[in-house]
Every structure is written in C-alpha cells, then in structure tokens.
Image: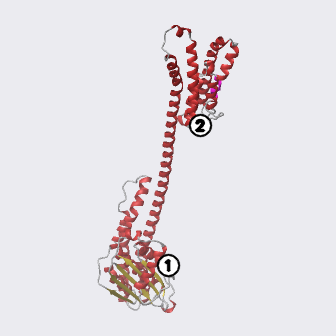
Amino acid sequence: MTATGAATAEGSFELGWWTRRRSVALDGALALASAAECAVHGIGFAERTGLPVWLVVISGAMAGLVLIVRRRWPLAVILVSVAVLPANMGGMLALVGLYTLATTEAPRRIIAALACMEGGGVVIVSYLLLDQDPALREQALPAWFQPLVSVLFGVAAVLPPVLLGMYVRARRRLVETLRDRAQGLEAELSLLADRAEERAEWAREEERRRIAREMHDVVAHRVSLMVVHAAALQAVAAKDPDKAARNATLIGDMGRQALTELRTMLGVLRAGEPAVRPDASARLAEIAGSAKTRQQEAEEQGPSLTELAALVDQSRAAGMTVDLAVEGEPRGYAEQVESTAYRVVQEALTNVHKHAAGAAARVRLAYREGEVAVLVQNEAPRGGGGASLPSGGNGLVGMRERVAALGGGFVSGPTDAGGFRVSAVIPDRAAADGAAADGTAADRAARDRAARDRAVPGGTVPEQRSAHG
C-alpha cells in the first residue's frame, strides 16, 4: 500500500474515541503496564497491612486498567491515581494522566490544582515510607532529610509530565495555526488564480471586440465605397466609357488600400507571438498583459486627422456631396486620439453611403485645447433612403466603445429634419488614463451630454439609435 493509501485507510478508522489504530495499541499497552505496576505494588501493600493478596492485586490491576480511558477522561485517571496513592500504587496512572490532561484544552488552574493534589499525596506517602524504613532509622540523618527527599519525590512525580504535556499542547497549537494559515493561503491563491482567469478571459473578449472594430472599420468603409462605385460603373459603362474607366480605377485603388490596411492590422496582431507556444499559465498572464499593448499599437499605427481630407474626397468621388469644415489650428494630439476621431468620421460616412444614398453630409472637425470634437450630419435621404447595403448593426456600438475607452463622450441620433447626426468629443490623453477616468454610467452620460452640447452647438440630439450601424 502506498503512503497515500495508508493515510486514507488510517483516516477512515474510528473506534470509540480513537481515530487511529496505533492510538488503540499505545493506550492498551500503557493500561496493561499500569495494571502490572499496580498489582506488583499491591503485593507489598498487602503484606504490610495483612489484607488478602489476591484482593489487593485484583483491585490494583483494575485500577491500573483505568488508563485505557485517558484520552476521553484524563481527570478520572488522575483521581483514581490519587485514590490508590496510599497503597503506594498508581505511579504510572499519575504520570500519564497528568501528561494527558496537560495536552488538552483544560484550564490551567484545574491542571495546577490536580498536580498539587497528586504532588502533595506523593510527598505524604514518601515521608511515611521513609519514616517507617528500619534502615533509615538506624542512621543518624538530619531532621530535614526526610522532608526534603519527600518534596523532591513529589516534584519529580508531577513537574515533568505537566511541563511535557504543556509543551506538546503548545506545539499542537502551533501546528494547527500553521495548517490553518497554509489552508488560508491556498484558498487565497485559488481565488487569485480564479481572478487571473477572469482577467485573462476579459482580455480575450476585449481583444476580440477590438479586432472586430478594426475589421469593421477597415472593410466596411472601403467595401461600401467599392459597391457604390461598382453600381455607378454599371450605370455609365455604356454611356460614358471614360467615367467608367475612372470608376474602375477608383475601385482598384480602394481595394488595394483595404488590403494594405488589413495586412497592417494582421501584422500588429502577429507581432510579439512566441516561436514556441508557452504553457497555459504563462499564456494567461501574457494575454492579460498584452491585450492593451496590442490595442495601443494598432491604434498608434492607424490613420490620423491629416488624412481626413482624403477620406472626404473618397466619398465625394463616390457621388456624395460632403462639406468639410475645420475649426482651430491643428494640434499634436496623441496618436490613438486622432485615430479614434478619424474612425468616427469614417464610420459615419460609411453609414451615410449605406442608409442615406444620395443625401448630402456635413463633417465638422474642431481642434480645441485638450480635446478634439467631430460632427457628421447628413440630410434626409432622397427617395426614402432605403438601405442598399447590408449592415451588421455594430458601427455605432464600435464608435461608442472607441470614444469611451479614451474617456470621451459620444452621442448619435436622428435629427428633426429627418437626417442623422453623430458627434464625439475626445480628450487628449492616453487610453490607459481614459480607462481609469471612465467612471460610472452617470459619469459617461454626463460626458455624452457635454459632447452633444460642445460638438453640436445650438441643437438637441435625442439619445437613441436608428438603423445606422
């Protein structure tokens, strides 16, 4: 049987108050030894008193067998040892009983009282035996000899077992304390591991959302423009070959731009991947620590506000009437701030292509101290403006997540004239600071209202979503 199997078998044992087999064997052996000791001393007591030897021997043996219950009733063992002490029996009863009582959680005053009772009895019995010894009477001993020897016998019979029992009790307490502390640390480590898994799962979900936003931004805008140009190409192919050729060239350029942006994004995602796959625990820590870094790297390699004019020109080339107005002087905002503002305008123009074909749009960009504001508003779609392109419904959600990640405010909704308006105010600080400053839902709502008031002066935007997305 292995050590584990033996421990399991030992732990399942139970007999009365014993939980281990070796405890039964030990107590049985001590009880037999105590019975033999009491029986031997009982013979001498019977010879001195004239009592029947068999009666004293049987009585002494039965008294010695009381030691079998020392773990359950140590107090009874000590009282029996005190009772048989006048017959000069029960020395082992007293030693083992006092030790056992000292190892329990019994109050110290009770242990001290029983120890004094046992020690006093040993002193008295020792003094009487010394006084009745003929050999000692023939010697000229000083008067203090018998009392001193009796006291030494009493101390020797009581002090060692009590001190040893108290030491064992203190050691057991220390072991239990260390065991409890180890269990507490194990539980804490388990909790920390669970939290690490939760953080890793959150990091994975955050990275999935970020990838989805990037894919949406890169693909949706370019492909939407390509579809619009393809429709125009089909319409003018027979009538105006030159314009059809220009539209075909634009479609090719947009396709190449979309592929370039996709390659750039995938390159960022693959950057930093180890050549050898790490173990699971290291991978959890790596995911939790690298998700935000990858997001920042991807955003820092993204577009900037200097490319906004080219973005508007692409929409104009697709036949949309777009008015671009810039307020203030260009400032050196953080890369992720300019990238987020660019993506908001890009997604808003994509929504106009999808859901308001032929409608004119206005783009407003405001450079301010410590923040940048963007506004994209389109007129009511012509001819009902039915959606001509499929939509996943994630555009507005992605814009709001991007702006909120930087601690900004985002508002979108239909206008009174039947169009749609998207506005955002983004503070000029790092994404990490923005996440810490994101705050509660009430704080985000306040920032959204502030964004609406600052980016769209003089108007009110209902905070609801339309089919744009």
Residue 244: image quadrant is bottom left
At label 1, the amino acid type is Ser
What element does badge 1 sit on?
Answer: loop
The reply to whether residue 350 is visible in this rendering is no
Frontmost residue, 75 versus 434: 75
Q: Which residues are magenta?
A: 64-68
What element does badge 2 sit on?
Answer: helix
Residue furthest top as drawn? 138
Mark 2 in CB contact with mark 1 (< 8 angstroms): no
Up-down: is 216 above or below 461? Answer: above
Residue furthest front as drawn? 143
At label 2, the amino acid type is Gly
Label 2 or label 1, whichever lies nearer to me, is 2
Q: Determine the main secondary structure of the stretch shown in magenta.
A: helix
Q: Mark 2 Cα within 10 Å, few/some/many (few <14, many 20+)?
A: few
Frontmost residue, 352 versus 326: 326
Residue hosting label 2: 11
Residue 333 locus on image (x, y percent):
31, 76
Q: Which mark is residue 192?
A: none
Measuring 57% from the left and 22% from the top, which residue is drawn there? 122
Measuring 47% from the left and 78% from the top, which residue is drawn there? 445
Up-down: is 364 above or below 78? Answer: below
Frontmost residue, 357 versus 86: 86
Residue 343: image quadrant is bottom left
Measuring 47% from the left and 48% from the top, which residue is drawn there? 185
Q: How many marks?
A: 2
Residue hosting label 1: 391
Which quadrant is the N terminus positioned in? top right
Residue 289 locus on image (x, y percent):
39, 60
Up-down: is 244 above or below 89? Answer: below
Q: Mark 1 Cα within 10 Å, few/some/many (few <14, many 20+)?
A: some
Instruction: Give the mark, 2 or 1, whose residue is nearer the N terminus.
Output: 2
